[in-house]
Structure formats: C-alpha cells, structure tokens
Image (cartoon, rainbow, N blue to C red):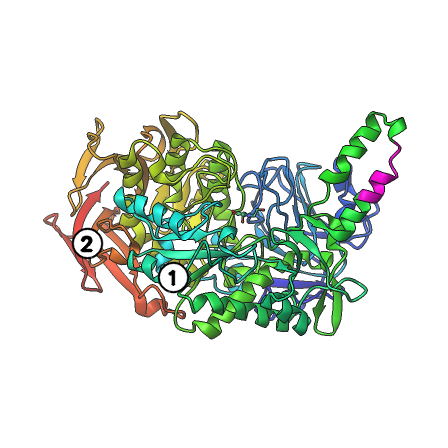
Amino acid sequence: MVRKFVYGKPLETEAVLTAFEECEEELPFLLYEKHSEVSPDTDSFSLPTELGFSEKNPLFTYSMKPDDIIYGLGEAVRGINKRGWRYISFCADDPDHTESKFSLYGAHNFLMILGEVSFGLFFDFPGAVLFDIGASDYDRLFIRPSGNDLTVYVIERESPLEIVREFRNMTGRSYLPPRWAFGFQQSRWGYQSADDVRQIVQEYRNNHIPLDSVYLDIDYMTNYKDFTIDKHKFPAFPSFVTEMKKDHIRLVPIIDAGVKIEDGYDVYEEGIAGNYFCKRKDGSDFVAGVWPGITHFPDFLNKDARKWFGGLYARLLSKGIEGFWNDMNEPAIFYSEEGVKNAWDRLSAFDETSLDVEGFFQLTGIFTQLSSQPADYARFYHRVGRKNIRHDKVHNLYGYNMTRAASEAFDRYSPKKRILLFSRSSYIGMHRYGGIWTGDNHSWWSHLLLNIKMMPSLNMCGFLYSGADIGGFGSDTTQDLLLRWLAFGLFTPLMRNHSAIGTRNQECFRFGHIESFRNLINLRYRLLPFLYSEFMKAALTDSMYFRTLLFDYPQDSHAIHVEDQLLLGDSLMLAPVYEQNAVGRYVYLPEDMLLLRFLAPASSIPEGENSLSLQDGAVISTKYCTAGHHYLPVALDEVIVFLRKGHLLLLCAPAEAEELLNTEELDLVAVLDDAKQARGSFYVDDGFCKDPNLEENLVQIQLESAADGSVFVHAGNTCTYHEHVFSL
Ligand code: MIG
C-alpha cells in the first residue's frame, strides 16, 4: 500500500509517475509538526541555515526500535544501514567523500525502515532535506525539509524487496544502457589528443586486455566549449570515431553544464536568442565561473531550454558518438561575479594593522570559500511554466533535468538505438533517463569499500547503471589497490577506470603482472552476457541487481547485518577483498553454497578444492562450502564468487570487445537444490533495442536430475551449453 501526504503546494518534480489519491488522515507512526517547538535534531548539530533550513520548517519524527535497520539515501557516505549519522540531500561537488561529510552529488530521498514495523518513505522535495538518522539521538529519526511544500509517500509492503519494487514501480523503469556499455571502459582526465587515445587503445590491444571504450574528458573541446571539438587535437573527428569503431572502441565525450560566454560561439548565441539561460532577479543572465571561464547555466527546468540543449547532443551523435557523461551539473560553481566582488570588498575593508588570530582566519577564508556557495545558489532563477523559481529551492532537480534533456533528445534522434548516458548529479526520477557514476573518489582502500556499500543503496533508488571510478579518481593508486578494485568493479554495470590529471597513470597496462590484469578483465567478458542478463531482468522488473543479504535472508539474524558481501541477481553472492595486504577474508554463508575461484593463470588448485575446466581451456577452482562462517584465502589476482543452491551461472569465452563475444556457446555451472533441480533465466536481446520485451527475450533454463544421476538441461533457445552440475 502506498499513502501519499501532501503538505502545502509542492512543485511537481516528476519523480513519481503514478497518480495516488491524497491521504487525509494523520500519519500514525510518523509524527509531523508544522513548526516544532523543540528541535532535537539541532541540539548536537547546528542547523545548516545557509542551506535554507530554519526551525520554522516542518519536522518529521519517527521513534526507531533498538534493532531497526535504516536503508536508503542512494549516493551517500557511510554504511548501507544509514543509522548513526546525519545526511543532507543537497547535490554537492565535493571531491572528498569522507565520513564527516553530509552530502554528495545526488539527492535520493528514499528510506526504508526495517524492523518489527517496516515501511518505505519518499520525501519528494526539490530543495535541501536533512535526515538525522540516529545522529542526535540514536533512537530517533528526524527528517526536516528546508521548506513547507512537499509530498511524502509511505510505502507498506510485505518484504523489503517488495517495498523497493513498489517505489521503483511508482517512479518508473530504470534507464537501459546499450550492451557495449557493459564492456570495460578506460578514462582519464588528461587525454589530450586523438593520438593520446590511439596510444591507450594500442596498449590495451597489444597487451590483449579487453576494452570497449575510451572517454573524452574536457580537453577534447575547444576551450571547454560544450559541443565543440578541438580541430588541432582531434582533426577529422568523424573519421577518428570510425577508425576507433573499426577497432571495436567507442568514444564517450563529457558534457559540462555551463555554456561559455563568447561572442560567435553558436551555442552561447542560441542560448541568448532563445532566452534559455538562468536569470538573476533583475532579469539578466546569471554568470558563473567554471572550466570554460565565465559561463551561463542553461535553465534545464524550463522545457523549451531542455529541448534546445538536448538537441545539441545530436551534433555529436551525427559524428558517430553513442555515449555521453554529464558533469558539473549540481551545478558546480567555481565562483560567481558577485561572490568575487564580495570577497574583494571584504578584503579591502580589512584592517591589516590590527590583524589578530581570529582576523587571520577570516582573512584566509575570504578566497577559499568562493566555490558552490549557497549564496550563489540563491542568486539565480528558473522559469517553470509562468513562475520564476529561485534556484536553491529546486537545486536538486538541476542535474536530473540536464540528463533528462539529453535522454529526451535521444528519443528523437536515436529512436531505435540506446545511447549510453550517465550523470554526476541526480535526483530520483533521473534514474529513468540515465545512470550515474559516483564522482570524485580517491585511490583509497576505504573508497573501494564505499563503492561496495553504495551499490545496493543506489539500486534501491533506481540507479542500476552505475559504478565508481575504479582505481580511484584523486590521489595516486597502487597496483594492489587497482587489482582488488577491478576484482569488485568487474561486477558493477559501469566498469570504468578513471583518474584525475596529475595523479599516477592507472591504465591496466602501466603495471607489472599484465597477465593478472588481463585475467581480471577477461573475467568481466566471460561474465558479460550473464551480468547483462541480470541487469536487464532487474531493470525490467523494477528489482535490484545488487542486494544485501537482508533482502533474501530476512530471518537470518546474522545475514541481515552483513554489509561487505552482496548478492548479485538471482544466483551469486560476492565477497570482495577491500583491505590492504589482506590475503583473504571472512565470509558468512547464510546457506550452503558453491565457491567458484577464478584463479590467476598457471596457478594450481588450492588444497581441498577441485578443478573445473571451461570450454576454452581455462580452469577454475570449486569447493562446497557449508552455511556459516569461513575464512577464505583470496590471492591478489583472484576473484571468488559463490553460487547459490538451485541456481546457475553462465560463462562465455572472453574476447577483446563486447561485440566479439561468442554468446552462442556457454559454460553452464549449476548447483542443484534439495529437490535435485536448478533453474534460471537468461535474458538475450540485440543490445540496442529501446523498448525490449522481457517475456519474449527471456530464455528459461531448467536442470533436472534423473534417478540414475544423469542431468537434463531444458533451455528455450539454441545455444550450446557445456554443463557443470554440482549438488550440495
Ligand atoms: O572540476 O572534467 O567528476 O570525473 O574528470 C573537475 C574533469 C571536473 C569532475 C568529474 C571528473 C572529471 C573532471 N570534472
């Protein structure tokens, strides 16, 4: 059951597509106070008034039971269970994702309270929202929107997964990427020219490490002007795109939110002529300093501006481009003209003769606090229908609507073929239009763990096509960190190695032990048809690709607290290694499972394990593992996964690009259940079609063993299966 509560006159965010009747009665368990007399959430933490919060805002309070687990909030710091910290939905360009932070790039106001009483909550509100989840008081959940007009949805269903599915159903089907976007992707801020890109591709090909795409960061443009291509660095761009495609490589250019102010630049001039930019109160176009220098921000909340900006992507589509990433769309602001002027004013008012320590800190703060300032977000306006709306009131909808602009244009310019698209900033609803990557992480072990923990939270909120910068964006990576990160990243739908200019080069061929890297990326390609199938099933049934154990083993009092193992699709459980110099890890098995160890080439089968030969001659190691706790060694170049009882896994032979995979001949590894059966389904389509039909594209596979022990495979398609059947 979904109950909808409307407070004041909320702005339509279009996050929810289903029309629900408004509920009149009070919320029985969620206390609503229009203005709260006491503000318990501000006792220990100060209220971030700079973001528009005040004690006049409504306050929602829920008393958590001692054992309640709180899931949700999508892209956020800390654990999967969000209890014990305070989070603020206010899309932020913050490259330091430490535990002390409150906000990252997305605003995903969906929570699940899981315990004796379980329900989902969605706070549909386009401005800042504060979630104090047991931070001020471990037993209380406080939610405070920074305004009075909002819609709250309460979702009650029979299980955690059903709550998610109900939420996903009401917010619409998740974005579907093309199948090639499940290949391995290489990126770096700093590839300067076509020759740089050629060299990267060449190294991957020479080393026989599979690769499907290379990203173009801001340097491909002329002076960072959106939809331009620097002719000197990238001469004859369309034929370069073709040349790359012949080598099975797709180029993925970045698009930034800000449009450079420059006479003669057609995008700028069209924007001015069409009145498509965000305005100041006095009606002039707002100016912000970002990469291109001074820019205007397209008014993505305005549908005409959206249509115009989206149409610009067609310029690159017509040059053969099939994928994009939208950046800086919180929007990030390095400085505003007003901000800089204020800083100078403050500086000149400064009396240096009487500088004391306090004054010193004020002085140094003047110029370090210019970027992405709340004051700047209050300086510009959007035109929505007939209303002017101040940006900070709808801040969290900006990146969402930039990505929506692109996606809606793709429906016009590429009606038959899916285009890869993902964004940095997002709000719920944007998951229909594109994926997200998790922004500027660091080459830290803790950020590998954060990547693991964020994935199921993002899936709850509909963001299925996502991943982190593998190896870490900021700071210098190391070989061991990159290997371990790839070993997890090879399961994430978006598998992209990306790093910042000035950091250590981290392409896979830069390190020794090339064969270890090749082996890990080969494994991604072995799994690719299967992972794509699990992804598509999750997307088309509003389900989750990554889940915590809690979803499938809710009665297991240990499993429900596990945060460093994930279920993937129907069949697999992952237990990634995420600690420096760890030679293995503890794993909790809620039931008997089959361990599959993908060994480094030429390594021998560990004692007590058995070898299994795949169709292409590769050998993997297997072991029956009984329910309970285990310590398992996992070498730096190995990957372990667990196959669940009654389920199956499909593997193909690796190839150097997605389109070269032979998906007609598959290894089928199955574990029979107690009834000596295993079943699964395999989703197959052309990898492009925009409106795929789940039923038509789903192949049912069933294994049954006869009395004499022989096993029959019934599959609804013509693939050749090499079966390897286990019974526990
Ligand atoms: O201010 O385009 O998150 O992936 O490489 C930095 C340069 C701007 C931030 C993105 C990052 C990208 C970088 N961008």
Q: Amino acid at mark 2?
A: Glu
**For the residue marked with disc 1, what is the amino acid?**
Pro
- Residue 381 picture location, percent across and down: 74, 63
Asked whether the viewer can see residue 562, the reply is: no
Magenta segment, principal secondary structure?
helix
Q: Is residue 659 left or right of residue 170?
A: left
Q: Residue at x 37, y 57 (%)?
A: 250
- Of label 1 and label 2, which has the lower sequence position? 1
Per the rendering, the mark at residue 704 is: 2
Q: Between 682 and 1, which is closer to the camera in this rendering?
A: 682
Quadrant of the image containing the N terminus: bottom right
386 versus 459 height, above or below: below
Report the magenta residues as a range.
344-351
Q: State the SS at label 2.
A: strand
Q: How far is mark 1 from mark 2, CA to CA?
A: 34 Å
Determine which residue is flagged by label 1.
178
